[in-house]
Image: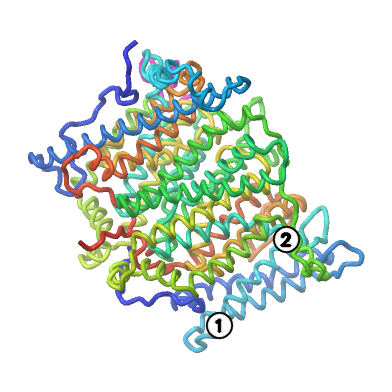
Amino acid sequence: MSAPTKGPREEPPSSRPDSGAPDDSSGGSESLIARWANLTQLKVLTYALLCAVLLGGVVIVATEVVNQLQGLENSELGFFGRLGQLDYGAVIGKPFEAYWALLRGAVGSPSRLASSLARSTPFIAASLAVAFAFKAGLFNIGAEGQVLIGALLGGWAGTWAWLQGLPAIVALPIVLIMGALGGALYGGFPGYLKAKTGAHEVITTIMLNTIALRLVEWVVLGRDPVILLDTTSSVPHSRPIAEAARLPFLPGGSGSALHWGLILGIALCGVMWFVMQRTTTGFEIKTVGLNPSAATYAGMSVSRTWILVMAVSGAFAGLAGVGEVSGSVGFIQPGVFRNIGFDAIAIALLAKGNPWAVIPSSLLWGALLSGAPLMQLEADLSIDLVRIVQALILLFVAADLIVRRLFKVEGDDENRTVLATGWGG
Amino acid sequence: MSAVTTDSRPIAEDAEAVTLPRTRLVRIGWIYVVLGIGLLEFARRVPENDVAFTFGIPPDAPTLSLDPGGAVLGIGALLLLAGIAGVLERRLGRVTSIALIVATAAFVPLVLILSLAYSTSSQQTNLIPLIQQSLVQSTPIALGALAGLWSERSGVVNIGIEGMMLAGAGGGFMTYAVMGQAEGGFWLYASVVVAVIVGGLMAALHAVLTVTFRTDQIISGVVINLLALGLTSYLRQQVIVPAGVGTGIRPDDIMIPGLHRLPIIGDLFVGQPIYLSMFLLLLGSAYLMFRTPFGLRVRSVGENPHAAETLGIDPVRVRYAAVILGGLIAGLGGAWFSLESVGRFEDNMTNGAGFIALAALIFGKWRPWPAFGGALLFGFANAFGIRLQSLSVTLEDVRFLGVPVPTLEIPSQLAQSLPYVVTIIVLAGVIGRAIAPAAVGQPFEPSK
């Protein structure tokens, strides 16, 4: 058995463009220096993954030792005597076994690979939402709620009676646009509040997340009055949306619900990259994000930019939600969208706000989550181990100073992710 | 990141009155005028039956009976007057703020009276348990806000309060599950201590990342939250579930000698240890922060670390101390969940309380007592939401300002989301741009 110490690193080296636009505002110039800087980034990222996997391995080893010690509870030996009795082969082998199972669970067969991709699909659009807000110096923790409201509005549109007979070419855009609109309204509202009253978006979006969850619960699951509940089904969820409004599956994806939303998400990354790098609006957004005072001085409207960015960010998240409704399940069920928005924050941070880097980051995240059940089955470790590894990956990517010092990676601090410089409205 | 920053901001005084920017006063004034007129008109339609608030268990408890129509009329008049005062802000000056704050406070009795008037089950309610519930429910919020207070006053943004609380809740309960199932007393308190220490450890990680490695403070907070969620869920599966601990472990009530004998309000002075320790920690934090050299150092490092450094204060050490102190308090807040109120551990059981604590902190403009006020508001909205479900309030034949309201029973989800709605309204309407400690969010690089 080969020893894949690098578990998650053996991701399909997907579409990471080796000449991807550097995420500073140099307008994507392909100078050697920019490339070299990107290479450094890649180096740091690789080491960060390595560190996370190693530390995750330490957790696994500790778990195994504790388990074996509990097995020896009844022996006459003292604590150190018991330590001597441990099966060290099993202890050392455990992390390899677990990561190997995780890797096979994620990409071990075509159908498993498809499941991983399907799991990653909503993350792409939702992470774009968070990354887009970062560009304007806004921290959108509200993707969770915006995903829900997008799913709610889009799903509701999908149940309209007059939509049933329409061809897909009409029905599908209506549902997707409604989803984006729902997210845009729900994201634009905290943007508006921030611009007009100074209420900090971090707090308002967190509040709106819970309100969204309760609202969706009431509309979808409420029995008195019944609004969208499918009364014929034993599992509580909304009435199914029209067949014409379903996103088709990708070839070979029907078994794992891998649908066209993946392609749409990748297209959205292109849209965001284009807007940020090639348009005046993008330039304004970046300026506002880097220095609101300077933007005001240059005659840009900071408050208008805030509202716009939060609305567009919400629209991305809303699309993530409606894409799941229309693509994978076909009805609204609040539980399906749990944690998509929160994971999106981590993924956007992992990608350092770069729209192209969002794709591999999302795939990594989805693959880890999708491979976890097999790891649980084979290595008897709780799937939450994957959450720990994810947190560690983010930790080492964020605290790249640790990695740089550990591995003596040269580099400047130019590329350090800086989001918030405080609470000042 | 405000568009306009001033460099010469004084350190916020503790006893600074709430003052609102002028344009906002006028805007709120107009809103209150419209609401006031609406209430005056609406008062005719309120159901006739008297509503009663009792203080304790009837029949021998003091009771306050009200005619709901008259009460709504009175509150409407109050709102109208305050609204006019807001509109005429230029003529009235300081009176305006006071009038608007009084009128805003009147929303609490208004909501209580209306929910009783339209209740289909009972027209009277006991206020004492409601107040007690509000206080108890505000415990984790207040402790979380104190955690944030220490961290942010020293200049370190802390959105990891949620994670620190969750880690405390999980670590504390795990200790109890492994060690203390046999005999309750000692191990229960030892588990609380472990929870406090675990919270402190998470905070120490936050401090290492933000102060030593100068990681972005928001990202570090996200890492803390993710890590706490992953670790506690993992350990619950691997340790707590196999240990098979029962539920229902709860420390006994403690009575504050003397005070609990008071008539009517005596019940408020009886409570569980963590709930009561909240008051001690509030007093202690306020004293330490504003009356001792250590507190002054923390605040000065939060406002201008370089100036503090020139005076011989080591900002790195002070920030470590403040962040870890906050984490210890957050750990106690976590223990409230698993070891005092619920008596078991569930995945993600803090469920956003850490973020709400952050809202309360900003609500209170980074000062302990106003932040406690924010936590109390939340606790009340929570307790009231629970009460609302038993009252089963149904709106029938209601028109407001001529707009008919559809007949429906107030769903429990609305009651549950009430605290969040209130927070948004308060943040947007009253607080707006709060002035944070000047250096919050900025990594400190020691002078060479």
B53 sits to left or right of A328: right
B35 sits to left or right of B148: right
The chain ID associated with circle 1 is B
User: Which residue has dot 2 on it?
Assistant: B132
Decide whether residue A34 is among the magenta residues: no
The chain ID associated with circle 2 is B
2 or 1: mark nearer the eye: 2
In three-dimensional space, the C-alpha distance between marks 2 and 1, rounded to whole angstroms, equals 35 Å
The disc at residue A311 is: none
Q: Name the amino acid, label 2.
A: Gln
Camera-side residue: B143 or B179? B179
Answer yes or no: is residue B437 visible.
Answer: yes
Return the disc, 2 or 1, that comes first in the chain's sequence: 1
Decide whether residue A250 is among the magenta residues: yes
B439 sits to left or right of B103: left
Which residue: 48% across, 73% down? B292
User: Which residue has dot 1 on it?
Assistant: B85
x%, y% of residue B48? 82, 66
Which residue sits furthest right? B59
Magenta residues, as a range?
Answer: A243-259
